[in-house]
Amino acid sequence: MSTAKTYEEAQREAVNIIAVLDDDTRQRLYYAEKAYDEATDQWLQDWATGYANERFDVDEDDGWGDAHEEGMDLAQESDEWLPACDLLMTEVAAAHGVSTDLLEKAAVLLDNYQGWSLVEQRRIELGLVTTH
């Protein structure tokens, strides 16, 4: 029997954990998750730019843009991707005063545009927030 969590299970777990956090921690975690998303996006852009620059002269060859797009796809398959994510997660978590464990939970919400609204919905269900 597999002990691996499905995305849905991981998301449900993240929502349940984040929903019961105090307001300050939840807010810092929200901003940390946004900063982590921006940091990983920037890392991917930088990697893809380096990839494209190694293959084409940006000023002289029309293939640079295609190489950059290819680099965006290849970046997450590179040997550097997971260590970079770990480092960025550690740095961002420390900068926002949250644990990497909590930031990992929040990062699960990145893949769902409704992630943080699901947290608020869960808070309402738990009676932690009243709606009027």
Image (spheres, rainbow, N blue to C red):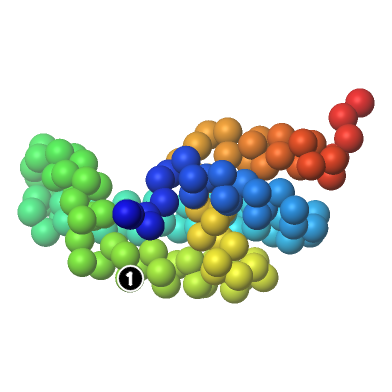
- Kindly identify the residue that appears in the image at 62 percent across and 46 percent down: 15
Q: Which residue is mark 1?
A: 83
Note whether residue 99 is visible: yes
Q: Residues within 10 Å of mark 1 (few under 14, many from 20)?
A: few
Is residue 121 shown above or below 128?
Answer: above
- 38 left or right of 76 in image: right
Quadrant showing the N terminus? bottom left
Residue at image location 25% in from the left, 67% down from the top:
80
Q: Is residue 69 above or below residue 43?
A: above
Q: For numbered disc 1, what is the local secondary structure?
A: helix
Q: Is residue 117 left or right of residue 79?
A: right
Instruction: Name the outermost residue toward the front.
Output: 1
Residue sitting at x 66%, y 35%:
117
* Res 114 quadrant in image: top right
Residue lying at the far right in this picture: please name it. Answer: 132
Q: Position of residue 126 (x, y in %)?
A: 79, 42
Q: Quadrant of residue 125?
A: top right
Q: Residue at x 20, y 61 (%)?
A: 78
Quadrant that contains the C terminus: top right
Q: Position of residue 51 (x, y in %)?
A: 17, 56
Q: In this view, which residue lies farthest toward the top?
A: 132
Q: Picture coordinates of residue 12 (x, y %)?
A: 56, 44
74 horizontally vs 15: left or right? left
Identify whether 96 is placed above or below 48: below
Residue 42 visible in rendering: no
Decide which of 44, 22 is in the foreground and name it.
22
